[in-house]
Image (spheres, rainbow, N blue to C red):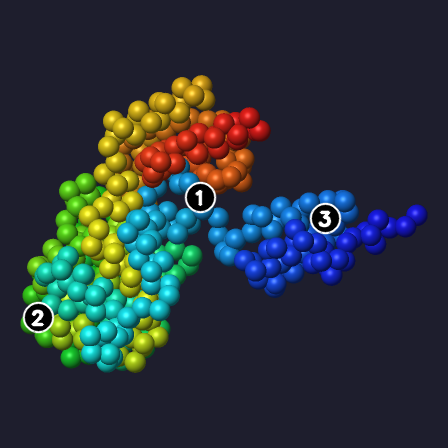
């Protein structure tokens, strides 16, 4: 008998079909061909029947997007979810990105027609939101800012850092190794749980390039602990004319009452930090970016370093960051300050529709800071077995798996997605 796989429709035959050809303009010929090839492959591996090739291809064309990244409803209650791309952008930032996608006056003064300073508007917005900073710089991400600080401010010299602040940030990346990769030598002082002002004072000398303070954003040391304050370190640093660099991680520009232990840029600068480093896509709620705020001299030295060009922010980032800084609210702020009463009402409404229970559930800030700080709230409790169907549904929903249940927390779900979420939950419950 003839192998049915020999009857798989040929590429040129499929390309001839009007239903296929109509997609060439929007998706591009290459993408259409790739989808054809993938569908034929599936038939060759006998994953689909030969008769299914054509309908599967049409379905693939219909659902194909420029990017294969799938939007996910974050029902984990974790606000800055690293695996979901950290901070979701607010509406104003999204619109700014779309605008900036075309030609824009990024480095052009339209009044005179001559060249202007790249990213000046975003820097101005940052200075406006944090007047304590004399100068600011925007780079690719927090890690890039840290590397640039080490390269520009501690060339072939020592960086003094506490043994309690030697951090691995995720996926095996260690901030210490990052700084050392620039040629700086890390001089560890103190112990894991306790480091004092004197530890820094006795290590500092002519060989010191930077006094470094890093906020342990993703873990907490409890019990018998001590750390030198930024004020103390700034005195030690100033006495030796060495810059004090503080990596706060999360990107709060001013104190956040809900997270009293979280450092912010304004307070650190007031306490005497020369340079503050933070991420744009954590608690600030903006795009991935590295934010540098501080004294003119130190920040300008960083901006002039050759490596600054390798880590500069792109126009989409600058547009989104400027818009985020101008906007009053953003999704991260809304989730952090979510009104418990309204979240509970929405949750109870869904629970009644689905006939499931509501349990107490603490949300979290997540990788962006507030390590260990619970954000009291509630969640729908579904059977654990529903989780895969939720993740693979349309739209994809990521729940939190805990204590043998599949928890759906609405803290980070925009109100206008509730109806969609309900449909996805109903569908997953029905198919599990
Ligand atoms: C997140 C973080 C970084 C890294 O910032 P990215 O923007 O992810 O590169 C550096 N330091 C601290 C303390 C952090 O929390």
Picture quarter containing residue 253?
A: bottom left
Say the numbered circle drawn on residue 53: 3
From the image, state whether disc 1 or disc 3 is nearer to you.
3
Q: Nearer the viewer, residue 41 or 24?
A: 24
Q: Nearer the viewer, residue 20 or 59?
A: 20
Residue occupied by mark 1? 72
**Viewed as shown, does residue 266 lie left or right of 73?**
left
Structural distance between the alpha carbons of marks 3 and 2: 71 Å
Count of residue discs: 3
Say the numbered circle drawn on residue 91: none
Q: Give the residue displayed 10% in from the left and 61% down from the top.
A: 132
- Looking at the image, residue 19 lies above or below residue 358: below
Label 2 environment density (alpha carbons within 10 Å; few <14, some 14–19, many ≥20): some
Picture quarter containing residue 416?
A: top left
From the image, state whether disc 2 or disc 1 is nearer to you.
1
Q: Residue 82: x, y in percent?
A: 38, 50
- Looking at the image, residue 67 lies above or below residue 185: above
Say the numbered circle drawn on residue 238: 2
């Amino acid at each position: 008998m003839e192998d049915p796989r020999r009857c798989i429709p040929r590429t040129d035959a499929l390309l001839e079909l009007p239903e296929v050809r109509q997609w060439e303009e929007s998706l591009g010929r290459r993408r259409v061909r790739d989808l054809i090839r993938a569908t034929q492959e599936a038939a060759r591996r006998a994953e689909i029947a030969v008769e299914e090739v054509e309908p599967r291809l049409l379905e693939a064309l219909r659902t194909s997007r420029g990017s294969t990244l799938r939007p996910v409803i974050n029902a984990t209650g974790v606000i800055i979810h690293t695996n979901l791309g950290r901070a979701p952008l607010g509406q104003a930032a999204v619109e700014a990105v779309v605008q900036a996608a075309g030609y824009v006056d990024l480095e052009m003064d339209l009044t005179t027609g001559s060249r202007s300073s790249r990213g000046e508007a975003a820097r101005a917005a940052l200075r406006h939101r944090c007047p304590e900073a004399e100068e600011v710089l925007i780079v690719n991400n927090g890690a890039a800012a840290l590397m640039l600080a080490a390269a520009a401010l501690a060339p072939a010299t020592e960086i003094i850092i506490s043994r309690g602040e030697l951090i691995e940030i995720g996926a095996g990346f260690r901030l210490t190794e990052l700084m050392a990769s620039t040629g700086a030598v890390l001089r560890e002082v103190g112990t894991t749980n306790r480091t004092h002002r004197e530890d820094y004072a006795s290590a500092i000398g002519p060989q010191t390039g930077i006094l470094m303070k890093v906020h342990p954003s993703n873990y907490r040391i409890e019990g018998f602990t001590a750390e030198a304050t930024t004020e103390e370190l700034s005195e030690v640093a100033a006495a030796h004319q060495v810059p004090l660099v503080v990596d706060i991680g999360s990107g709060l520009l001013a104190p956040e009452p809900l997270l009293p232990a979280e450092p912010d840029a304004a307070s650190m600068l007031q306490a005497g930090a020369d340079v503050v480093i933070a991420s744009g896509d954590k608690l600030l709620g903006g795009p991935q970016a590295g934010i540098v705020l501080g004294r003119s001299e130190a920040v300008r030295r960083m901006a002039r370093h050759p490596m600054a060009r390798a880590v500069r922010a792109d126009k989409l980032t600058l547009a989104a960051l400027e818009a985020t800084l101008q906007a009053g609210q953003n999704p991260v702020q809304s989730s952090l300050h979510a009104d418990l009463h309204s979240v509970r009402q929405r949750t109870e409404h869904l629970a009644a529709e689905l006939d499931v229970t509501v349990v107490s559930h603490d949300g979290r800030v997540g990788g962006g800071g507030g390590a260990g700080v619970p954000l009291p709230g509630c969640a729908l409790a579904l059977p654990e077995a529903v989780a895969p169907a939720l993740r693979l549904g349309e739209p994809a929903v990521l729940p939190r798996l805990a204590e043998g249940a599949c928890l759906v927390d609405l803290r980070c779900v925009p109100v206008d997605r509730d109806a969609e979420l309900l449909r996805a939950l109903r569908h997953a419950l029905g198919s599990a």
